[in-house]
Image (spheres, rainbow, N blue to C red):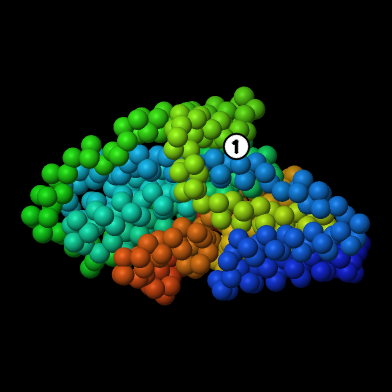
Amino acid sequence: MKIMQVQLDPIAGIVLLVFVGTYLAISSEKVNRTATALLGMGVVGIVLWTAGTDFQMVVEHIEWNTVLFVTSMMIIVTIAASSGMFQYMAIELTRPTQGDTRRLFVYLLAFVFVISLFFDTTSTILVMAPVTIELCKALEIDFRPFLIAEAITCNFASIPSIVGAVPNLVIADEAQISPGLLFESLMPLSIILFIISIPVFLKVFEEKLVRSEDHLISEMMLIDPQYMIRSRRDFYLSLIAMSMLVLGFMIGPSAGFEASMIAITVAAGLLLLCRERVDEILKRVNWGTVFFLIGLFGLVAALRITHIVEALGFIIGGLIQDNEMIGIIFMTWVPAILSAVIDNIPISAVLAPIATQFSTMPLLPIALLFAVNTGGFLLPIGAPANILAIAFAEKEHQPISLLDFAKIATPMAILMLGVGTGWLLLLSIFV
């Protein structure tokens, strides 16, 4: 009955129309996504106002925890990157490879896999892409296979971590998933996917992962990682901050500390110690992404206020019909396909409350989280990490075409979705 009410409510219909129109405009990539999202939020606010709903209700429904977390992590990563910390770590990690291209490829992907547990996918590529390009240019090898593989890896490597991707935060906050449960459920799967991906990548890129000339390898081995450090003070401050973050994310949930509270405290402490450089650091933060999230969450809030999300939940519930196996398959493949063409953040925000309504199926939110991350690389436009990798290649005048990216990423995503579905169905037997 409630579904019919939502369908016949003209206000709900207009809100849904604005939501769809906003995302079609954003997906076209012909408009600024931040400005469009904020405009959409403003328009639905006006629509709701005509029905007697105050804009304050929209503001209150925004996922401010997620916004604060993303902003804080951007500040921390900006300070760490400017100190040269990530460049230093990358050089140290690649020295044991002795310039062997295939070993370098595997080492860098392993590094991406590890840091993806602690940073969101956008931050990971922002850190790794410049380092990878410089290393490959020094060895005179093609950096494009590295960038493609790194983008794919950071997408699936982020699934066991609440802080590994923005969708993870959105879903975990809605479903009240503990970091421990998420890690236990999906870390083994993430490791399996990494083990599967390495031989596939090496086979696919076999012709491009050629050995560099010996004199170039010798020159690279002479690089002292210490030269990568631009500010020793910021370097050590960043190391301390990262350690505090990791420790906080590990023990914080058991003490009732939100990830956003831990992140904002560490970020504020770093800014305080940076003193006169605070304004410079804040200018380098990607505020466009922050305001995009605010606009996005405002739009999703309007869907909730008008009960559209609730109605969608009834429809999906009718399809699943309390069958956990069908539920897991649905919450894995449908959101994954949607995430291939629509930003996975709105997909998460809309479907998270639906996944949580099935109290007898605790794995549905976890399946959704896995789906939106893995579905992000079904197509090149599905996740910010993919777009950033392509953008870095274009900046170096060696572009990665969408087709070239899709040739690698799409079959890999389908394979991983299949493996992940099997893993989740296996878990459902024991949960």
Q: Residue at x 68, y 68 (%)?
A: 22
Give percent across and percent down for residue 107.
Answer: 28, 48
Identify the residue position indicated by label 1 in the image. Answer: 260
Q: Residue 81: name its quadrant.
A: top left
Q: Residue at x 62, y 24 (%)?
A: 255
Disc 1 crowd, CA 10 A, few/some/many (<14, 14-19, 20+): many
Quadrant containing the C terminus in the rendered view: top right
Q: Nearer the viewer, residue 91 or 412?
A: 91
Query: Would you say 204 lies left or right of 218 here?
Result: right
Residue that sits furthest to the top in the current view: 255
Give percent across and percent down for residue 196.
Answer: 38, 55
Q: Residue at x 56, y 74 (%)?
A: 30
Judge whether 86 appears above or below 350 on screen: above
Judge whether 242 appears above or below 104 on screen: above
Indicate the amino acid at tag 1: Ser
Judge whether 160 appears above or below 348 on screen: above
Quadrant containing the N terminus in the rendered view: bottom right
Secondary structure at numbered mark 1: helix
Say if residue 96 shows up in the picture.
Answer: no
Say if residue 209 shows up in the picture.
Answer: yes
Q: Nearer the viewer, residue 414 or 66?
A: 66
Counting labels gives 1
Q: Residue 111: name its quadrant.
A: top left
Q: Nearer the viewer, residue 421 or 224?
A: 224
Q: Residue at x 66, y 57 (%)?
A: 296
Give percent across and percent down for residue 287.
Answer: 55, 51
Query: Would you say 276 lies left or right of 209 here?
Result: right
